[in-house]
Amino acid sequence: MKVNRDLIEQLFTSLPGKTQSKIVSAQDIIVKAKEQGKKVVTAIGSGPNLHEGVTTLIAELMHKGIIDGVTTSSAVISHEMAGTLDRVKRVDSRLLGLPEDKSNLFGVFEATVLEPEALQRLEKEMTVDRDLYQKIVAAEGSEIIKAAGNMAYPMGLRTELLAMDILQLCQRRNIPFEEIAGRGADKRTMIGAGAELGIPVLVTVPQLVGGGKVGFAVGDSIPISARSQRIAQLLDSAGVIIESAIALTQEIHDGPLETFTGHGIWSDWLGEWTYSLREKNVIRIDLDPNLERIWNKEKMNNEISNAVTQGLPKTKVTGVPFRMEMSGFSRLPDSLPIIGDIGTIWPILALRVAESLGISLDFMSYNQSLKEGKEMREWIVENVEPLNRDTTLS
């Protein structure tokens, strides 16, 4: 999808002035870091990041030298292995004669819409139940675009089987699953860009759950202690960390090897390698306005720090519904919240940063509620290919 500068400028001017100011501040922080030779790393969740095209935009920013590392979830890895977004046919499970007690809560079964040639290629790798597939295609139902690499037949099953093959290679060579999978992935995915450019793309320990057997394979590919250290080293290398639609970040960036928020104290005490978030800029794009309320309370009155110091429950002290990562984030001296939809914030921030650095972008994501967003999702379905098994294994 091409860059529509006029649309992005319209999106920017439609935002509240406070949000515009935060975006400009984030832009300045990122541009300054890149000009000083510092690295920018993203910590992203799944769901919206896939559907809004943010993962594909991040891959573009990796190719353009703006993003230098990624932490994400095993669900994102499984979806990128399947080409990020799929067009699927959804039918009532009962029409297929499937047992009701095995049906999901929606009562639907999904199939990836595949061209005959793609289906034939798939049959060289695995057994495909043609009768079932044709029954789904012929049945009454609806077609939608979604991140379906883990659920729709036969691509979901293919991803699960492929994960087990890749896991064997990982364990023989002590290499993270994401790295080997990336070698056969489309270069417009984060894992594909990471493998091509030598940029780390790592699943964090709190985000191992998800993606079916891909999550198991990611978790089993290298020990958790080794994974934790790789993630800590990636975050240590960063001058800026951008968090996007993600939970549990307190366990990600101030985990067992980080000393500024205190959780790495005993690793440091025992002489192990540790790092600090003390001078790092952490930018968080989040829809929850409570994040900014907590951040403001800390900046104005040190309410969170005082609650921690006194061992008091932070929710009661602040009177604000609390997510755990709000605590660590708000206490970081160089944290910055941007409250808004990632589908809107990311394209604005990406374009402003790229133009400030004199970089032209060849792909841009858009909020899926826009006409351009719908076109972008179609573009991803048509252009971003599933992982090539032969390339990966060779």
Image: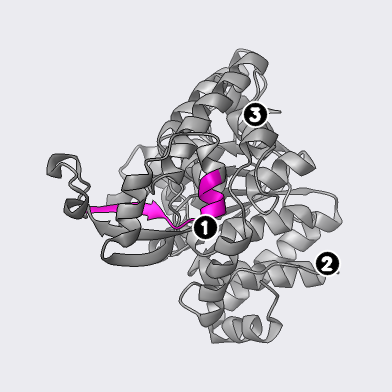
Residue drawn at (56%, 47%) of the image: 80
The label on residue 115 is: 1
Q: Nearer the viewer, mark 2 or mark 3?
A: 2
Q: Nearer the viewer, mark 2 or mark 1?
A: 1
Q: Earlier in the sequence, mark 3 or mark 1?
A: 1
Residue under pointer 3: 230
Q: Secondary structure at mark 3?
A: helix
Q: Is residue 205 visible?
A: no
Left or right of 9 in this view: 205: left
Image coordinates of residue 274 in percent, x first then y, are 65, 26
The label on residue 359 is: 2
Contact check, label 2 and label 1, Cβ < 8 Å: no
Name the colour scheme. Answer: one colour
28 magenta-colored: no
Along the line of sight, the residue nearer the viewer: 342 or 131: 131
Residue drawn at (35%, 37%) of the image: 311
Q: Secondary structure at mark 2?
A: loop
Give the magenta range: 108-120
Image coordinates of residue 374 in percent, x first then y, are 51, 74
Real-space Cα separation, disc 3 to disc 1, in angstroms: 40 Å
112 magenta-colored: yes
Residue drawn at (63%, 53%) of the image: 334
Image coordinates of residue 106 in percent, x first then y, are 22, 55
Q: Quadrant of the C terminus?
A: top right
